[in-house]
Image (cartoon, rainbow, N blue to C red):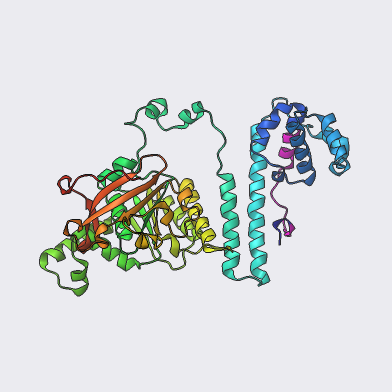
Amino acid sequence: MAISDIGIDRPLPANLDAERFVLGAIMSDDSAFLQAAGILTPEDFSLEKHKRIFLRMSELHERGEKIDRVTLANELMKQGQLQSVDGLSYLVSLDDGLPQLHNLESYVGIVKEKALLRRIALIAKDAEQRALSGQESAIEVLGATEEALIRLGDMQSRNALATPAQIIMGYEGGQNAFLDASKRIKGISTGFLKFDEMTGGLREGELFILAARPAMGKTALALNMAQHVAMNPKNPKAVAVFSLEMSKESLLTRMICATASVDQQRFRAGYLNHEERTALQNSLYRIVESPLYLDDTAGTNLMDVHSKLRRLQAEQDLGLVVVDYLQLMQGRGRFENRVQEISSLSRGFKLMSKELRVPFLVLSQLSRATETRQGDHRPLLSDLRESGSIEQDADLVAFIFREEVYRPDKESLKGIAELILAKQRNGPTGRVKLAWLNRYTRFENLSADTGDEPPPFE
């Protein structure tokens, strides 16, 4: 069923005067067409005759011809549409009541606003009729509605072209802050010094994909970063963690033990001494006081994540979103294959991060290619599982690699991990060495005397 075929009981939102004034302003001065056409499309007009008039204006402009009553009437006549727009008399009446000093920008804004409200109403009506028809499952109806709303939000979020002067005027702190590196807005620190140095921290609106083979520690590293952001004594920010693999209790246990430096096996077995119990109590207190939010809802989808984050952002200074992990999520709607579904999810997270102006740390699995590769088992971008557009959408892609997994007999490799920055849109690629504390499922900065810096990533 096409959205345009849906019956609406009440009139759809529209402002016919604003539509007439936009068209009338263009006919009185055709240089105004570009100002309107940069924002409006023919489909933004509520009346069919207004759509046709604006479309014919577009065709005249594309041919470099002047737009006025005569040329427009002639163009409509050639298309056999002059009578369908109520003839030349209607074209003449379009600027009736139009002020001499008209405010075209406001008229265009009103038309665009009403068009958006109509599209929202039609999507809602489409969802209602699909739900009542009983021909589709609830998941299919929800998926189609979610996809339509996300696509609509994407259309509205496209910013207009801006001059350098406009960009600097809109920059917080103005020209001085823009040119002074010390005053520019920095990303959020992850607590890993070399990583922060190479990336500038996690920046708002950016999608960070952290990928690894199972048991490499990607959840541990993500939680370490999340805790650092939420428990930073200087500037704590709220962190939302969506886990599709582990329960909230398991996540909390991991974080408490990692913060207290208590062996998880001893914790689960209950063999704890006085010092460990005290450390756990102190760790729990610090975590409880921090703005950490955990969600382990099964079957979480993009719309669930979006609505929960919008509510949280209204109450807290949201600093980071963690999703563990991408391949466990289900896209809403119909997809030809799993690659398309994962690509839809990665694109959705990128759009969400831009809209909410918050960095997203999304975990991802790697394919088995790293296991079967001869010689160097370090991951490559091509190893991203069901990658699709993951690499394209991400601003930063990093892999966790621990060579001790492949060479357990070599003592010098134990406890050493590499964070491989395989892609960074706004910075260098390379490797960051970290210390891996397996007993506590925790990564730490590697002390300078542990070894030489690794060679640059190729």
Q: How many marks?
A: 0
Residue 324 visible? The answer is no
Which of these two is toward me, 98 or 420? 420
Location of the N terminus (image quadrant): bottom right
Q: Quadrant of residue 427?
A: top left
Residue at x 37% of width, y 36% of height: 185
Q: Quadrant of residue 371?
A: bottom left
Residue ID at (55%, 39%): 159
Above or below for 196 versus 387? above
User: Would residue 9 be counted in the magenta stretch?
Assistant: yes
- Front in this rendered view, residue 257 or 379: 379
Compared across the picture, whether 302 is left or right of 105 comes to left
Residue nearer the viewer, 220 or 310: 220
Is residue 296 shown in magenta?
Answer: no
In this rendering, position of residue 42 left or right of residue 390 = right
* Residue 102 as seen in the image, left or right of residue 383: right
Q: Which corner quadrant holds the C terminus?
A: top left
Tell me where residue 249 appears, x and y as whole percent: 31, 68
In this picture, which residue range is highlighted in magenta?
5-25
Q: Can residue 166 be seen in this view?
A: yes
Outermost residue toward the bottom? 269
Question: Which quadrant of the figure has residue 292?
Answer: bottom left
x and y percentages locating residue 122 in the rendered image: 67, 56
From the top left corner, tell me how far across and down residue 336 is, in percent. 58, 63
Q: Is residue 119 above or below residue 263?
A: above
Q: Where is residue 216 in the image (x, y as percent from the top left)?
A: 30, 61
Name the outermost residue toward the left. Answer: 274
Q: Residue furthest front?
A: 374
Q: Residue at x 69, y 49 (%)?
A: 13
